[in-house]
Amino acid sequence: MHIIFIFIFLFSSDLFSKENNVYDIISKNSNLSTFKDYLDKTGLDNVLQKKIPYNWTIYAPSNKAFENTPKQLEKLILKDIDYSKRLFTDHILTKEILASDFTEQITTEVTVSNKPIKLYRSENLFVKDVVVVKEDLIAENGVIHIIDCIMFIQPSFQDSRLSQSQKDSFPITSCCMQTENEVLLWKQNTKNIVY
């Protein structure tokens, strides 16, 4: 009996010792299939699988997020590899941040695209006003949080939904990309950034 248990343990432990990286988890989640396709097209899939000295936090747009975006997003941004890569690096941080790491106090983090974003928790985990619908999909090299929108990180003065006091307090804000005008603004802002 003990020999059988040891034999099973030896062979099964090899299966459990290979943890999935963030890209593997995204690839296996049918709710993230569109995001996975864009990671593949932009080459970000290779980046997320590399062994590097830090872990990732990915705010992964669900399939629903892509279905609910303005038609202009695909036409002006998603069909262009460079713009797509820039858009999705807005959704990735080079630091592992679990949902439990947050309180109601706003924390500022920086995306791979070097844009600051405000994160906080109030019942749900939020990226400014973007609600995380599924938290803490943990991988060997980071964590994934699923969101139901495409994030639009922008200078606050361009966000008509904010009061002047909010614009003064938060020079950069993130929100869900919901209108064709926001798609145009994101593209215009990105043209002006030198990488």
Image: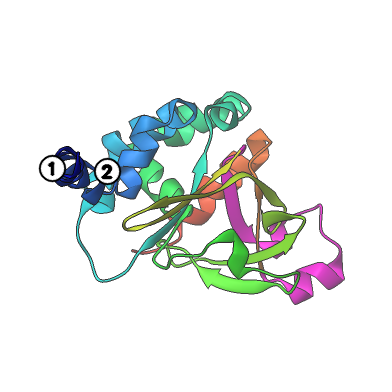
Is residue 50 shown above or below 42? below
Q: Name the residue at 32% across, 43% down.
A: 23
Q: Name the residue at 22% across, 51% down.
A: 17
Residue labelled with disc 1:
3
Task: Say what secondary structure mark 2 lies in.
Answer: helix
Residue 53 falls in image quadrant: bottom left
Percent across and percent down for residue 164 are 85, 68
Label 2 environment density (alpha carbons within 10 Å; few <14, some 14–19, many ≥20): some
Task: Say what secondary structure mark 1 lies in.
Answer: helix
Visual colour scheme: rainbow
Q: Nearer the viewer, residue 100 or 176?
A: 100
- The kind of residue on which mark 1 rests is Ile
Q: Which mark is residue 45?
A: 2
Q: Nearer the viewer, residue 187 or 172?
A: 172
Looking at the image, the residue that sits furthest to the front is: 1
The quarter in which the N terminus is drawn is top left
Q: Which mark is residue 12?
A: none
- The kind of residue on which mark 2 rests is Asp
Is residue 168 shown above or below 161? below
Q: Is residue 21 left or right of residue 101?
A: left
Total tally of numbered discs in the picture: 2
State the extent of the magenta-drawn residues as a range.
Answer: 148-171
